[in-house]
Amino acid sequence: MFTFLPSSRHQMNEPDGTGNSRKRQRKEGKQENDSDGDDSFEQDGSKKKKKDLKGIITSLILLEQQEKSDQEEQSKASNEEKMLLEANHNKRIKTMVEYYDKFQDYHVEVQETERRKRKKSRAIAGAVAVSAVSNGVAAREGIKDTKHGGGGQQRRLWVKDRDKEWWDDCNRPDYPEEEFKKAFRMSKSTFDMICEELNSVIAKEDTTLRNAIPVRQRVAVCIWRLATGEPLRLVSKRFGLGISTCHKLVLEVCSAIRNVLMPKYLQWPDEDNSRLIKNEFESMSGIPNVVGSMYTTHIPIIAPKISVAAYFNKRHTERNQKTSYSITVQGVVDPRGVFSDVCIGWPGSMLDDQVLEKSALYQRASGGLLKDVWIVGTSGYPLMDWVLVPYTQQNLTWTQHAFNEKIGEIQVVAKDAFARLKGRWSCLQRRTEVKLQDLPVVLGACCVLHNICEMQNEEMDPELRVELVDDEMVPEAALRSATSMKARDAIAHNLLHHCHAGTRFI
């Protein structure tokens, strides 16, 4: 059976009024709680939206920063790759240059080794032959075997037979003059004159083992080599001689030309000749007291083993798009284009004014031997008490233009002389096999032979003319003397106002 507690029954049987009142209170309280919940929900939603928006903005900022970082890394990697490619390219170029230099050195060493072997063989054979002759073993008919009574065989020094047909043909008296001049850049009469003057120095005597090379052939080997610039192996085939023999002959004849002919055909003019030169230059340009026109050119060479940077020619390298090395030749010429002074052998990295300061000409001028005279130079030289150069500043006056026009007529004399020098002697246009220490002798011989041809009025084939590509760099100190500046202004004034200057600059 179930039993109800009194308290429970009492609660269930409460009056209706009191129960309704409590229900209403509970209902109103519930409504208030519901309204408070809605407000708190709206506040929570707003906060959540703001939080989500901040997260989105932060993500965008991070993405942008990441993109910038990626771009920077990509740019850095691209630059590193570019630098690596350039380094590899430069390394390959350097390796190729070094390989070429080593190849050239190896070629020269092989030739030198062969020469030494042949020289040693000749010495041994000569000793054997002399010993045989002295002991009475050898005879004109040969060597006979007295024990067996057999036949004999003549003993001699073995010499390789070479074809000399080309030179024998050129050496004939009836050989055409034009063909001879085309091969040797001079007439037969001029060639004979050179041979006659060098005969006492380069002539050799015959020996019991072989006949000496004639003087004409010795001179011909040297001149043909200078004129054509062909490698020694081709010179060897032309004249029927060994490669090392041809190399030795070229140096011997060039040395003889420098020692014997240079003092006679390349010298500074004396007082009488200086007066004639001044008059000729003045009649040409209207500028008085000019004794010479000066120019500096570059001769290409193979990269030397020492002081490579000093001989590096930056301007020729940029123009030729390949590494170039050179030495300089500075020359002063008279109105005919004959050299009266040369300075040979300074490295190609030096500017024209630096070469001038190293020359014997500069030393003579410093000693007062060029007082009251002018040597006309290009804009690559400084204006000094004895060096006259054109105006180089911008916005020149009428008078300065007129002066530059007339001084240019003297400048072109030296430039044309160097163009004929390089055109006549093609060995000056390309890198040669001659060692660096021997080049001044060879280049000096070319200058002397040029003077002889000019004095003998030897016309050069127009096809041989070359275009000079030497750059004129304005020196850092273009003005060395205020007195010379006033003197140049006075000359320019006189040229214009005495109607010596033309109007080609207009």
Image (cartoon, grey):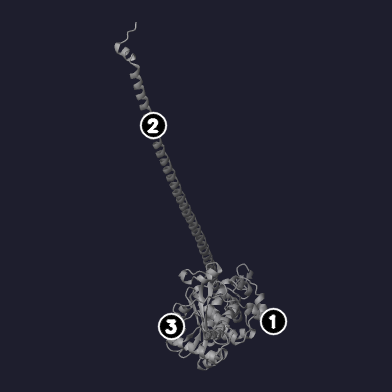
Nearer to us of marks 1 and 2 is 2
Sequence-wise, the earlier of marks 3 and 2 is: 2
Q: CA distance from mark 3 to mark 2?
A: 103 Å
Q: Of the numbered discs in the image, which one, if any, rests on residue 35?
A: 2
Kind of residue sitting beneath label 2: Ser
Sequence-wise, the earlier of marks 1 and 2 is: 2
Q: CA distance from mark 3 to mark 1?
A: 55 Å
Q: Which residue is mark 1?
A: 176
From the viewer's perspective, tell me whether residue 31 is left or right of residue 215: left
Q: Residue at x 50, y 75 (%)?
A: 327
Q: Nearer the viewer, residue 121 or 341?
A: 341
Secondary element type, mark 3: loop
Q: Of the numbered discs in the image, which one, if any, rests on residue 480?
A: 3
Q: Is residue 78 above or below residue 40?
A: below
Q: CA distance from mark 1 to mark 2?
A: 131 Å
Q: Position of residue 231 (x, y in %)?
A: 59, 71
Kind of residue sitting beneath label 3: Arg
| Residue 335 visible in the snapshot | yes
